[in-house]
């Protein structure tokens, strides 16, 4: 998963580099605001259902009938959520553009497109979640490669057809995940996506997603709200610089995502305390190695900027150094987060998400006016450290309670 996803992300990163070079810092800042909005909307279209469906499919891996039912019911709930998102986008795009995103009203069409076409991202992410739940990791990676490869083709096309507009780039970029999701049907039957309404299964999914939904939305806001705050407190040029640094650091954060994807499914199936004890010893070592290894990437911040987005973005070098450190702390947290799938503590995801959002919002508002882009990076580091400490404390408490009963 790590090798496959990092490879796909490198492809996406190359495409993003091409876009950033062709758009320049200011227009790339606008594109980044739209991209952050898309990520937030995709999580609203998820509401924790991906994790809930993964959990129940993994626990019933030998029951094809139940797997199909959980997938169909989960998809039905997602269709309702996406329908609500599209309605908000159609009627509220102008207010969101000018008031919430602090963009000129001329960008309203882009914002409306993001709301309406977020369906593609929701479908893609649900497909990969189902693939991972049935442990078809290779197909999940293939979906990722197809959607990232499509973006690269778009990037190359933008080099051939010079001065490709922001509108065209945004529109085609939104269609890339759809192609990636369609590839998943090579492994997952179409019947998994036929809507089904089953009250018992809905109740089970909601029992998990009510916590994870809060967590995922809060965590996504935490990961993207600083870009929106930079746009509101500074300007589109600074947003472009900060977004470039965030995108480069996100390549390193993919190791954390891939690691968590594999560990979450495996740890959820552990039954014996001896297995978990052995896992914890490895988790500590893995966390330390990840923390040190990714932190060292901060030494490569200058060449990372020069050889990717270019000299126009050199102002983002100091920010990128601190973002690499924040990513290292995130990765060190991943092995312990997997424990909450076994302990049945979905509350953790909600609490950690809320903590992340509150700390990042407060930190950005306090630090960005004084320290500029570095203030946003400082806020991320503070948030990651606090979440790591909270995770360790809550994991210890949950472990003791789980085996005391």
Image (tube, rainbow, N blue to C red):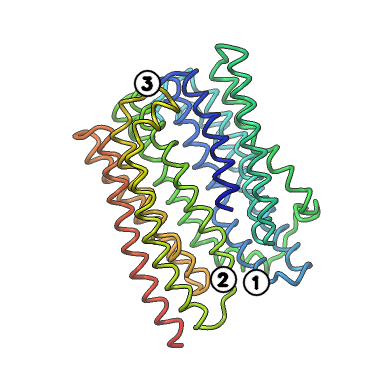
Q: Which residue lies furthest to the top in this view?
A: 162
Q: Residues within 10 Å of mark 3 (few under 14, many from 20)?
A: few
- Give yes or no for contact between labels 3 and 2 (Cβ–Cβ under 8 Å): no
- Taking the image as shown, residue 285 lies to the left or right of residue 118, namely left
- The circle drawn on residue 340 is none
Instruction: Identify the residue position indicated by label 1 in the image.
Output: 59
Image vertical order of residue 393 relative to residue 404, above or below: above
Label total for image: 3
Rendering quarter of residue 351: bottom left
Image position of 334 with respect to 37: above or below = below
Question: Residue at the left extreme?
Answer: 370
Question: Seen in the image, is 303 located left or right of residue 64?
Answer: left
Which label is found at residue 268? 2
Verify CB contact (< 8 Å) between mark 1 and mark 2.
yes
Instruction: State which mark lies toward you, 3 or 2.
Output: 3
> Separation of disc 1 and disc 2 at Cα?
8 Å
Q: Residue at x 31, y 45 (%)?
A: 361
In front: 325, or 166? 325
């Amino acid at each position: 998963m790590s090798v496959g996803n990092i490879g796909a992300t490198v492809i996406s990163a190359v495409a993003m580099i091409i876009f950033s070079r062709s758009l320049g810092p200011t227009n790339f800042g606008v594109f980044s605001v739209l991209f952050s909005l898309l990520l937030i909307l995709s999580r609203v279209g998820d509401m924790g259902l991906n994790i809930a469906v993964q959990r129940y499919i993994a626990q019933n891996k030998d029951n094809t009938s139940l797997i199909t039912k959980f997938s169909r019911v989960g998809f039905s709930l997602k269709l309702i959520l996406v329908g609500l998102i599209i309605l908000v986008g159609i009627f509220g795009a102008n207010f969101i553009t000018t008031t919430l995103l602090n963009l000129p009203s001329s960008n309203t069409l882009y914002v409306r497109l993001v709301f309406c076409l977020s369906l593609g991202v929701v479908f893609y992410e649900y497909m990969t979640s189902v693939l991972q739940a049935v442990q078809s990791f290779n197909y999940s990676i293939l979906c990722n490669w197809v959607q990232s490869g499509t973006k690269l083709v778009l990037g190359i096309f933008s080099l051939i057809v010079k001065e490709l507009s922001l509108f065209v780039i945004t529109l085609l970029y939104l269609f890339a995940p759809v192609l990636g999701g369609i590839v998943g049907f090579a492994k997952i039957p179409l019947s998994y996506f036929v809507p089904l309404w089953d009250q018992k299964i809905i109740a089970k999914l909601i029992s998990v997603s009510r916590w994870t939904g809060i967590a995922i939305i809060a965590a996504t806001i935490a990961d993207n709200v600083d870009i929106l705050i930079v746009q509101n407190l500074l300007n589109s040029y600074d947003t472009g610089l900060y977004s470039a640094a965030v995108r480069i650091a996100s390549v390193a954060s993919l190791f954390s995502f891939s690691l968590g994807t594999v560990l979450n499914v495996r740890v959820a199936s552990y039954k014996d305390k001896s297995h978990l004890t052995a896992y914890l010893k490895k988790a500590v070592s893995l966390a330390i190695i990840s923390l040190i290894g990714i932190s060292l990437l901060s030494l490569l911040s200058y060449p990372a900027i020069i050889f990717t987005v270019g000299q126009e973005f050199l102002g983002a070098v100091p920010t990128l150094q601190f973002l690499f450190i924040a990513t290292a702390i995130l990765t060190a947290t991943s092995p312990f987060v997997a424990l909450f799938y076994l302990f049945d503590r979905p509350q953790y995801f909600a609490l950690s998400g809320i903590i992340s959002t509150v700390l990042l919002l407060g930190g950005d508002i306090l630090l960005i006016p004084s320290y500029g882009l570095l203030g946003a990076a400082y806020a991320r580091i503070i948030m990651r450290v606090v979440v790591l400490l909270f995770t360790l404390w809550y994991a210890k408490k949950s472990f003791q309670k789980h085996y005391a009963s």
